[in-house]
């Protein structure tokens, strides 16, 4: 299962080069056993980025998960806790979550059209 959460964020001093600060917030917020798993795993079942929509000028935090466990541990944290503000301790910046949207899809839906299935032979 692939899932993506996008949060429109706002705050003084906020910029798109703060991904590592948001990563730190995320790791401090979720279950510590899962954090240990992520730190010792060679591949990560998620991505996280901060980006600016050039048309609207709005800044977003996007987290994408690539399996159910990552979805349960990362995206559900935001959905179940109704996060409205994020404090980036290292910079002393309070970030406000203005809106949240979430989408889910399966690998089959992503790669296969239900009308026409294509076989790949390797």
Image (tube, helix red, strand yellow):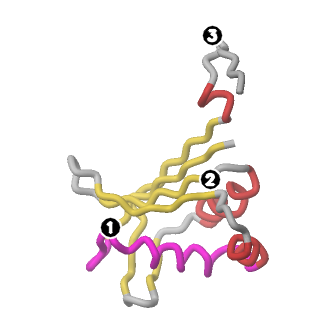
| Residue 52 is inside the magenta segment | no
Please tell me which residue is depicted at 73% across the width and 75% down the height of the picture. Answer: 40
**Between 27 and 78, the one nearer to me in the picture:** 27
Q: Position of residue 16 (x, y in %)?
A: 32, 67
Q: Identify the residue at image location x=54%, y=47%.
A: 102
- Residue projecting furthest to the front: 122
Image point 68% across, 55% down: which residue?
A: 71
Q: Which percent across, then down, holds residue 94?
A: 39, 81
**Magenta region:** 11-32
Measure the C-alpha gap from mark 3 to mark 2. Answer: 27 Å
Identify the residue under disc 3.
116
Q: Give how far apart the Cα atoms at labels 1 and 3 are.
A: 40 Å
Disc nearer the start of the sequence (1/3): 1
Q: Residue at x 67, y 35 (%)?
A: 106
What residue sits right under mark 1 in the picture? 16
Mark 1 or mark 3: which is in front? 3
Task: Give the x, y percent position of residue 47.
Answer: 54, 59
Q: Is 104 above or below relative to 86?
A: above
| Circle nearer the N terminus (2, 1) | 1
Q: Secondary structure at mark 3?
A: loop
- Residue 65's label in the rendered image is 2
């Amino acid at each position: 299962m692939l899932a993506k959460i996008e949060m429109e964020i706002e705050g003084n001093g906020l910029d798109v080069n703060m991904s590592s600060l948001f990563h730190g917030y995320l790791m401090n917020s979720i279950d510590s056993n899962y954090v240990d798993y992520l730190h010792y795993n060679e591949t990560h079942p998620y991505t996280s980025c901060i980006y600016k929509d050039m048309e609207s000028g709005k800044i977003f935090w996007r987290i994408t998960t690539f399996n159910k466990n990552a979805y349960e541990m990362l995206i559900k944290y935001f959905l179940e806790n109704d996060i409205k503000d994020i404090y980036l301790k290292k910079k002393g910046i309070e970030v406000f979550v203005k809106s949240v949207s979430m989408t889910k899809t399966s690998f089959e839906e992503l790669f296969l059209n239900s009308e026409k299935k294509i076989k790949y032979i390797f």
